[in-house]
Image (cartoon, rainbow, N blue to C red):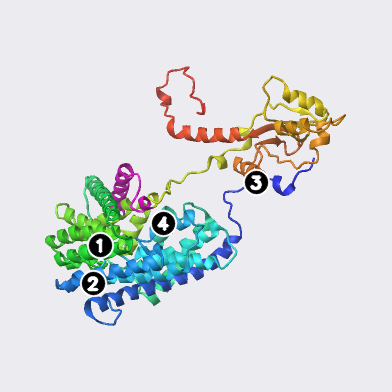
Amino acid sequence: MHRSSSMNASPRLGDFTTDRRVLVLVLMAALVGTGGAAAAWVLLHLIALTTNLVWFQKFTAEHIPLSGLKPSAWMVAAPALGGLIIGLMARFGSEKIRGHGIPEAIEAILIGGSRMQPKVAILKPISSAISIGSGGPFGAEGPIIMTGGAIGSLFAQCFSMSAAERKTLLVAGATAGMTAIFGTPIAAVLLAVELLLFELKPRSLIPVITACAVASAWRPLMIGSGALFPFAGQLDLPWWGLFVSIGVGIVAGLQSGLLTGLLYKAEDLFGEIPFHWMWWPAIGGLLVGLGGLIEPRALGVGYDIISDLLGSHITTNEVVAILLVKSAIWIIALASGTSGGVLAPLLIFGGCAGWLEGQLLPGDAGAWALIGMAAMMGGTMRSPLTGILFAVELTGNFALLGPLLIATASSYAVTVLLLKRSILTEKIARRGQHIVREYSIDPFELLRVAEVMVKNVDTLPASMRIDEAVAFFSGEERRHKSYPILDDSRGVVGLVGRADVLQWRSERPPGEETLFDRVSDRSLTIGYPDEPVSHLADRMVAADVGRVPILDPKTSSLVGLVSRKDLLRIRATAKSAEALRVAYFARRPGTPVPENEPA
């Protein structure tokens, strides 16, 4: 019997599937990390240049806060004109520049083969600079994730690479850009794990770490060194401080749910406007400008607000005004389809709420503002570890790790329980793509073939004549779809099934031909008892077979059979592990153990 050695060879088993190919990805990721850092430098300078041209008529990339702006007609007109330009760029350039960037990056990873267009890498930072520079209440992180991701994707498309490898370089570019802007390499890596990679493999994790490390090395030369918002505040909480941190987290979770719900309600309202979506950013910009008349500091990125919240260099009235106005114009602007990020606004919203709560709580209000920022980010983006480490790296403050952990986990729990989807995945779901953001081990990887195979296998002898086989399958008794064929030494020489019999019945009389004569020249897919089920399932798919004989690797004798039905049964068993609840110590003696549960 002919067997394909490459198809049936037992694969090398180990903890990981990563091979030396990862070294090539590491070298590529280092180049992509440099590109991501350069893109961050360009984006920040474009934002600063546009901001100064629009508001101060100065051709400079120096950072000048908008806190000194005076209400005027231009404050209303500028965001509207910026929105009009972005609408035109999206209509005639690329619709991918609309929105805050992260959903588009996720969509490219999951359904686009991690392929992005060159024009996205050019138009996204330009559109974001125009949006933010003309007063849009956004941050630079979403655009840089999209732009850095496009750089990684375009670089990968220059080489012969798999979709998984392109994904790795796309994410490497995205996280490198985030690292360069915020100086948060660990948080960027965690963002990749919790939000972008949809896996946790050395093949992807090592190159992403490499890109973030390279971007972190470039940052002092390009952007600056040290924490973006240095903060040394501490909280000397009593024992009941645990519950206070939980309360702050719950408030952040509820705040997150409210903002998410309002955002998509506003998006639905824009969808009812009887104009082409190209005009929506201009309409949204007009409303943003009106909000700026109420509170000018609500316009733009607002990094100065974060600094003032941490240092408590701000009044209660200012915090309330910023929280209400910036939340409203952020929802409107983002729902209109303009270009900009969500991370910096989330930090401001959470920070404002935490600072206000800090007026009634023990300790420094700035510390509670930082806790509110992390809780808001972690709960809204459903990335709690990213939120915690982002707050620590952003400020250089490790003293608040405990309260940060508790509050962010509480916010995460609230949003997971209250909302089916996050602010990021809801947009993708509205385009018809459902995303599951839970990682678990594939049960096919955990089980061995011996645990799922049928051991008492019905077989047919190789010496059976063809006419006997036809009569066997044509009888009234119910038969299997196929049977292994054994020779005199109990070795498997092939499989015979109903399809074969139907073909033989239409042929000329077979004479003295046997099953061995008909099937011994076919290639045969086989399995082994000790190999993972996943490896066997892969071979079954590749060979398009539904039943595979399992052989003893030493004697090559038949020891079992695996069919597609057996593989589907594994899925049912895995689901029962989640749904079946048993109190073993409360069971009465002699009560049988439920099916699919170990004794």
Amino acid at the residue labelled 1: Gly
Note whether 59 is above or below 106 in the view shown: below
Which callout, 3 or 1, points at the residue further toward the start of the chain? 1
Which callout, 1 or 4, points at the residue further toward the start of the chain? 4
Closer to the eye: label 3 or 2: 2
SS for callout 2: helix
Separation (CA) of disc 3 from disc 4: 35 Å
Residue at the disc numbered 2: 78
Amino acid at the residue labelled 2: Ala
Which callout, 1 or 2, points at the residue further toward the start of the chain? 2
Separation (CA) of disc 2 from disc 4: 37 Å
| Span shown in magenta | 401-427
Residue at the disc numbered 4: 190
Amino acid at the residue labelled 3: Ala
Residue at the disc numbered 1: 284
Residue at the disc numbered 3: 542
Q: Position of residue 432 (x, y in %)?
A: 42, 49
